[in-house]
Amino acid sequence: MNKKIVIVGAGPGGLTAGMILAHRGLDVTLVEKRSRVGGRNAELRLGDFSFDTGPTFLHQKFTLDEVFAEAGKKAEDYLDFQLLDPMTRLSWSDVALETTSDAVRMESNIEAAFPSHGEGYRRFMSDHARKLKTIYPCLLKPYHELKALVSPTLLKALPYVATTQTVMDVLDQYFSDDRLKLAFTFQAKYLGMSPWNCPALFSIISYIEYKYGIYHVRGGLCQISAAMSRVFQENGGTLRLDCPVREVQFSGRRAAAVLLESGERLACDDVIINADYAHAATHLLNGRSQAVESMERKKYSCSTFMLYLGLDTIYPDEPHHHVIFADDYGRNVADIQSQQRVSEDMSIYVRNSSINDPGVAPPGQSGLYILVPTINTRHGFDWRGQQTAYRDKVLERIENKTGMKDLRSHIIAERIITPADWRDDQDIFMGATFNLAHTLDQMLYLRPRNRMAGFDNLYLVGGGTHPGSGLPTIYESGRISSNLLCDSHRVPYQRVDYAPQFIA
C-alpha cells in the first residue's frame, strides 16, 4: 500500500491515527510544529520537574488498550499504569469525600459524609450500567453522513440523547444534597461545561470513573503520547518535529498537499488534521478557510488558568487528585459560562502526583499541577495584567483549604498558563481548552465530522470532532477517522473491541 498520508499535529488524536494507519501499511508522515509530541497532552518541563501540560485523569482505559492493539502493540509494554485508590478527594467548605471504584467502600464513604444517600448511589450505578451499554456504541460510529442519524444504534439511544435534561437534572433523581450531586457532575469539566447545561447523556462520565476507576501513568499521562510516538515510528511512520504547517492545498474537493512554513510541499493522497479545529478551519485551509467571525458564532468550552509549581518539599498527606469546590459553586459556574466574569470564589483542582510517582521531581521535592476552570478569551479579559494577582488568590485559597499552609514558601520553580496563553502560544481558538462546547446542536452529525464536510479526503481528529473532548474520546476519534480513510482505499482491517468485557 503506497498511499501517502500526512497528519497535521502530533496530539493524542493524530498519534492514534498515525500508529494505526502505519500498522495497516500506509505511508504516513506526521508533522508537528513543536519540538515534542503530545499537544495538550505533552510533557511540560521546569528544570528537573516534569508535568503534564493538560490531561491528568485516565479513565476508560480499555479504549487506550484497544487503539494500541489496533496498532499491533500492547499498552502495558510501553507504559506503567497505576489504578488509583482512593481516586479523588472532593472538598466543600464543611465536608470532604474520598472517591473510589470499590462500590462497597464508595457507598460507605458517601454514607459517612452524606447520611442516607447510599441508596441513591446504588440506583445511579445500576441505572447507568444500562445507560452506558445503550449509549456507548453510538460513540464508536462516524456521523459524516445524515443517514447515520437513523441507525438502529442511535435510535435505541434516542431517549438518552434527544432530551432537554441536563446532567444536573439527572442527578436530581438520585440525590437531594446539592454537594453530593457535584460529586457526580464535576466530571463535566472534561467537556469544559456546566453541569446545569451539559446534556444529560454525559452523566455516563462519572459512572465510568466510579465503575472502572482512574489511572495514573508513571511519569505522567504525557508518557502516553510519547509511547504512541514510539509505536508510530516502530510501525514505519515518519515523524517530523519543529515542522509548522502553512496550509493544506487543494485540487477541487481533494486535499492534494500540505505546505510547510519552510516552503516544502508534501504531496499526499489524504490529510488528517489534529490541530485545534477552529484554528485549523480559520487558518490552514488555503482558500477554503472559514471566516473568524463565522467561527466565533459557535459555542465554546471554558478555559483554564494553570499553575505548575516545583516545590522543595513533599506533602505526603495531600491526595493525588484534589478538587476544591467554590463556596458558591453555582455562582462560580455561572461566572464561567458568562464568558466575562472571572470568579474570586473559584473551584480549584490540584494534582500532587509525587506521592505516587517520585520520578517526576528531584529527591525530596515535588511538583504540583493546579487547574482553575475560568472564562475563555471571547470578551478580551486582560490576563496579562491580572495573572499575578489571580495567581496569588489561587495559592491563598489552596493554603486556606488544604494542609499546605506554607505552600508559597516552598515554591522554587513556577510556570503560569492563562487563557490568553492557550490562545496565543498553543493556537487554541478563544483559549477554549476543551474545544467546541458539547451542546446538542454541536454533537454527532452537527459536530465537525470525522471526514470534514465539503472535502473528499480531509479528516479530523481531536476534541473538536466526534465523539468529543477527553482522552478516551479523542483516541476514538483517531480510530474512527483511520477507519473511514481505510474504507475509502479498501484497506482491510479488523476492529479490536474490549468493551464487551467491561460494559455488560
Image (cartoon, rainbow, N blue to C red):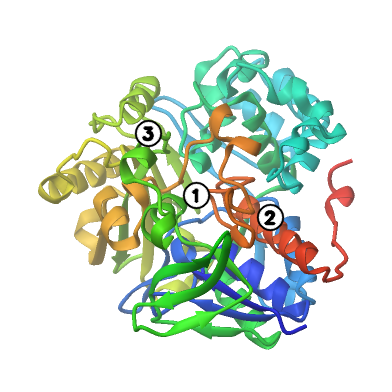
Q: Which mark is residue 468?
A: none
Q: Position of residue 330 (x, y in %)?
A: 39, 20
Q: Secondary structure at mark 2?
A: helix
The quarter of the picture where residue 263 lies is: bottom left
The N terminus sits in image quarter: bottom right
Mark 1: amino acid: His
Chain-order first, disc 1 or disc 2: 1
Q: Which mark is residue 297?
A: 3
Q: Secondary structure at mark 1?
A: strand
Work out whether residue 474 or residue 388 is closer to the camera in this orientation and state it. 474
- Alpha-carbon span between mark 1 and mark 2: 25 Å
Work out whether residue 2 or residue 163 is closer to the camera in this orientation and state it. 2
Work out whether residue 296 or residue 36 is closer to the camera in this orientation and state it. 296
Are the two marked residues, 1 and 2, in contact with CB atoms closer than 8 angstroms?
no
- Alpha-carbon span between mark 3 and mark 1: 35 Å
The C terminus sits in image quarter: top right
Q: Which mark is residue 476?
A: 2
- Judged by depth in the image, the label closer to the viewer, 3 or 1, is 3
Q: Position of residue 304 (x, y in %)?
A: 35, 46
Lateral position of residue 137 relative to residue 332, left or right: right
Q: Position of residue 204 (x, y in %)?
A: 68, 34
* Mark 1 Cα-neighbour bin, 10 Å: few <14, some 14–19, many ≥20: many
Chain-order first, disc 3 or disc 2: 3
Q: Secondary structure at mark 3?
A: loop
Q: Is residue 315 visible?
A: no
* Mark 3 Cα-neighbour bin, 10 Å: few <14, some 14–19, many ≥20: few
Residue topped by disc 1 = 321
Q: Image point 43% across, 53% down: which residue?
A: 281
Q: Is residue 242 visible?
A: yes
Lateral position of residue 361 relative to residue 375, left or right: right
Chain-order first, disc 3 or disc 1: 3
